[in-house]
Amino acid sequence: MFKQWRELTLFVKLFGRHFKWMILGTGFGLLAAISAVGLLALSGWFISAAAYAGLAVATAQLFNFFHPGIGVRLFAIGRTLARYAERIVTHDVTFRILQSLRSWFYKHLEPLAPARLMMFRSADVLNRIVADIDALDNLYLRVLSPSLVALVTSILVVTFLWIFDPLIALSVAIFLAIAGFGVSAVVLHLAGPSGRELAHLISDLRIRVVDALQGLPELLVFGAYPQQIESVKQSNLALLKAQLRMSHIRGLSFALITMFSGLAVLAALYLAVNLVNREALDGTALALVILTVMASFEAILPLPLAYQYLGQTREAGRRLLEIVETEPQVVFPDQSTVADRPFSVSFERVSFRYHKQAPWALHNVDFHIAAGRRVAVIGETGSGKSTLIHLLARFWNPAAGHIRLAENEIYNFSEPDLRRLITAVSQQPHMFNATLKENLLMACPGASDDELLAALNAAQLLEFVNGLPDGLNTWIGEAGQLLSGGQARRVAVARAILHDAPLWVLDEPTEGLDPITEKKLMQALKQQTAERTLLLITHRLTDLDWMDHIVMLEQGRVMAQGSHAELLRNNERYAALHRRIT
């Protein structure tokens, strides 16, 4: 049974750090439920007893109005205060739980990037972080706490009624069990499939909307916008249908509880009247018994709604565990176990492919970069150049061979140390939806404005920034939409300059630049990488004479390597390509 519910049992265990607050919130809920029953029951008895006492002058004078009145006031105040405290505590602990769950989930998510996250769509991952974790608030707030309150309240009510008559207590217990747990079980059975479907439909709708927003320019240019909007409408329609089915089930559950509540009152009334007729029960207690039965169903009322969405909560938990239980492709040691040596880089017969069915992106790649030397890797698109960066950054592990940094296995570096030792410009640098300054500071959080401007100057972007009204504080938009492709790439170069590290890895740093700017940028990079180890990825053969070594890749294999002069002299293919561009 527990294996079937493991999607939720694991999360219940994660709630442990908030256990005291959860118990406190549930305790206030129980106090509010008991006060509600006590208020209605005592009020009924008080009115009946007062009316009965008023039938005779003697009894009216002897009747104690004060003690029951105090009890009514205490129950009324207690119910109000307990309900208020219950809302405060349970909602506070729910927010704390959600905060803990998001931190826990992100802690498991981060090591999966990017290798294992390729199988998930970004909008779907976002939906799991937000909507699926939000769905888990049902677990404590609407399932565990109300169920415990309903159970304890029912036991106390049945025990109280047993004092007056066991048969009344048993009949009410049966109706409470049917209304509370029987109806909840039926609702869970009926709504389970719809709840699971609801989780997927919400995710599907968000994915389609995000795709429409992110791809809006292309959709408009190619006239595909109406089709995308139609797919969003169809997804929304499917979601509305599922929500409508859930509404029907909710209406049915409320109707059933109302029916069983009425039947319980009728049964108790029938039995209590017989007891009064036989003088086995005081007439003043009749209202107390009936109103106790009526009030007891207030604690049962929230249960069907909670169990109605339990299917959605379970599916949300399953979707989260699908990511959490995914094994990372790359695991870093907690601490580096490396020797301090000159920062060389070696690829030793390295082979790699992105998945088992994919062709080899690299095959027996073998080359060495001595400390402080500059090496260019050239090749056509798809030859495996960018894969070298992915492996150096340990986004993936090679399928075979060894990668060494400073003569140490790359596996021996902790993640913080590896990130500190490498500065990189990727082929598709990401710009965050923030200011230009914030995008630069991510590479060096403590940098001053003067240092930021110096980096921008080296990246040939200072003139552009000085022309902006807000300068460094200019908002560049989502994915840097307010920047051109060449400007975004130069921002990435400025970040690399700010981060500065023993190893520089530059993937097509001049792509999208005009020849004059490209030449100036390359000259600046020569100065910035002096006495640094440099790996330059490019498909261009221009201005490579300053490279100490050049590696030619073709279909993931090293076809030739040597200095620029050696390749011109000894490799006809390299010489022919060079003649073609010059």
Image (cartoon, grey):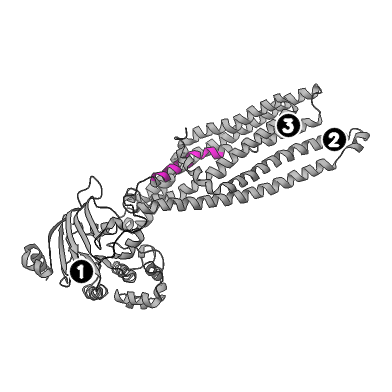
Residue 83 magenta: no
Please name the residue that numbered disc 1 is placed on.
Answer: 374
Which mark is first along the chain, 1 or 2? 2
Choose mark 1 or mark 3, whichever is in front. 1
Q: Is residue 520 left or right of residue 300?
A: left
**How far apart are the alpha carbons under marks 1 and 3?**
90 Å
Q: Secondary structure at mark 2?
A: helix
Residue located farthest toward the front when viewing the structure as drawn: 339
Question: Which residue, given by chain and number where applicable, does mark 2 sit on?
Answer: 51
Q: Which residues are magenta?
A: 305-322
Q: Are marks 3 and 2 in contact (CB under 8 Å)?
A: no
Work out whether mark 1 precedes mark 3 in sequence or the reverse, and give the earlier one.
3
Looking at the image, the residue that sits furthest to the right is: 58
Which residue carries the number 3 mark? 290
Q: Nearer the viewer, mark 2 or mark 1?
A: 1
- Indicate the amino acid at tag 3: Ile
Q: Check residue 317 for magenta coloring.
A: yes
Q: Is residue 579 visible?
A: no
Mark 1 residue type: Arg
Estimate the x, y position of residue 184 in percent, counting from the top left: 55, 34
Mark 1 secondary-structure assignment: strand
Res. 579 image quadrant: bottom left
Q: Residues within 10 Å of mark 2 (few under 14, many from 20)?
A: few
Residue 10: mark in rendering: none
- Identity of the residue drawn at 59% across and 47% down: 20
Q: Percent x, y for residue 61?
A: 92, 38
Within-10-Å neighbours for mark 1: few <14, some 14–19, many 20+: many
Front position in the image: 290 or 346: 346
Q: Is residue 394 above or below residue 49?
A: below
Q: Main secondary structure of the magenta part?
A: helix
